Amino acid sequence: MKASPSAKTISIAILPLAFAALSLSQMLSPQLLSIRSFISYPYLFNGFLVALGERVHYIGHPGIPFSLLLGVVVRITHALLPAAGPISAASLLIEHEKILAVISPFLALLNSAALFIFGLRARRKFSLLHVLVAQALFFISPHVVQMSTHLRPDALIVAISCINALFLLDLLPLHAFPFFLGTLLSMKHVFISFVAELVLFKNFFRAMLALVITASTYAVYGLYLDFPCLACEGADYLRIYWNRLLGRHVPHQESDFYLSANSWATYIRPTELFMNSGALAITLLVGAVGVYAALRPQPGKNLLSPLRVAVMVFLSQIALMLIYPLKFYFLFPAFGLVPLVYLLTVERFPEVATVLARVVSGLLLVNCIYLGRAFSIERKVL
C-alpha cells in the first residue's frame, strides 16, 4: 500500500519540526550565558545600526547579509512592541532582550522552513526514504542545533546548506546561483571553497560572467560599510589561509584565547571531540562513498558532474578547517554538505543506495542515542 501525498508531506515535516523544537529548547537560558553566544551582542548591535539606517561596524566574518536580516527583524519587532515609540538607539537598547527573544526563534524557524522546503523539492527526484535520511543528516552535530538560535552567521548553516543543495540538485534555477554565492561570501569568508561550484555553468563564458556577478554582489554588500574595509577583511583571510598552508605562523585576533597559535592541538576541545565523534564518523563514511562514486567512470564527457563538484567542495571545506584553524565550527559547512553528497551519491550509485541508506540510518540512530546519554552526563556534571 502506497502512502498518500499528504502522508508523505507530513513525514517530510516531522524532522523540520523536531529541529525547531530542539533549537528553541536552547533558549531556556539567557542568551548572554548560552554556549558560544559571546558574539551575539555585536551582531545584535549591527542589527540596531541597520534598523537606524546606519552602516554596520562589526565585520568579523564579515556577516553583512546577516546584519541586514537582523536589521529588518529588529525594525519589525520594534514596531510591533506594545507602546513602542519612535525608533532610536536608546529605545532599542532598553528593549534589547525582547528583541533578542524574537530574533532567536525567527532564526530557528527559518532553518526549519528551509529544511522542510528542501525535503519537498528533493522528493521530486528521490524516494521518501532517501529524502528523510538526507534531512536527518543535518542533525549529526549537536553544535549545529545549538548554534541555530545564536546571533552569528553560523546560525543559518542549515538554511544555507539546503539552498546550496537545491542548486546542485538542479531543483533551483542555476542563473540565480551567483547572487546566492556573492551573498554567501559576504556572510562568511569560510565559504570561499563554494566558488568552485561555478564550474557547473560548463561554458567558460557563462562561468566567467557568473564569477563577475558573484564579485559584484559581494561588492554591493560592501556599500553597507567602507568597501576597502570589506576587501581588506577578505584579503586578510586569504593571506592567513595561504600562510598556514605553507606552515608559517600567523598572529590572529583570537590568539588571546589559546595557549599557542602554532599547535593545531590547542584548537581541539575535548568536549567538542566527544560530542562530535558520531558526526565525524558519519561525515567520513558518506564522504568516502561519495569520493568513490565520484571517481567512477561516468558516461559522456561530463567531467565536472554535480557529484564531483560537491565532493571537491566538501574536501576543500575540510582542508580549510585543517589549515585555519582546527575548530569544529569550521566544519559546519562540511557537515552541511553531507546531505547533498549523500543524495548525489545515491543518484550516481543506485546499486548501493538501499544499503547506504540503511547503514547511515543505523549510524544516525546510534549517534542520537549516544548524544542523548552525553547530554545526560553533561547535565549531571553541571
Image: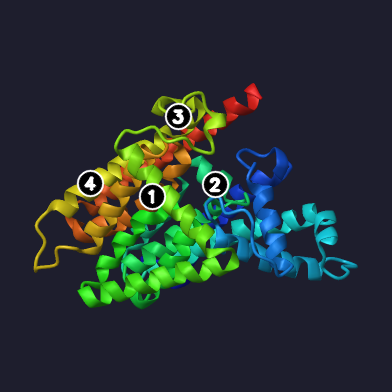
Mark 1 and mark 3 in contact (Cβ < 8 Å)?
no
Q: Is residue 136 visible?
A: no
Judged left or right of residue 15, residue 336 is left
Q: Which residue is mark 2?
A: 145
Q: Secondary structure at mark 2?
A: helix
Residue 224 on image: x %, y %: 59, 67
Q: Which residue is mark 4?
A: 289
Inspect the image, locate mark 4, and give the three-letter code of the amino acid beneath it: Val
Q: Which residue is mark 1?
A: 238
CA–CA distance between discs 4 and 3?
34 Å
What label does residue 122 carry, if any? none
Looking at the rendered image, the disc whose residue lies closer to the viewer, 4 or 1, is 1
Tell which circle, 2 or 1, labels the residue nearer the N-terminal end: 2
CA–CA distance between discs 3 and 2?
28 Å
Looking at the rendered image, the disc whose residue lies closer to the viewer, 2 or 1, is 1
CA–CA distance between discs 4 and 2?
25 Å
The quarter in which the N terminus is drawn is bottom left
Q: Residue at x 38, y 41 (%)?
A: 321
Residue 7 on image: x %, y %: 47, 66
Judged left or right of residue 282, residue 293 is left
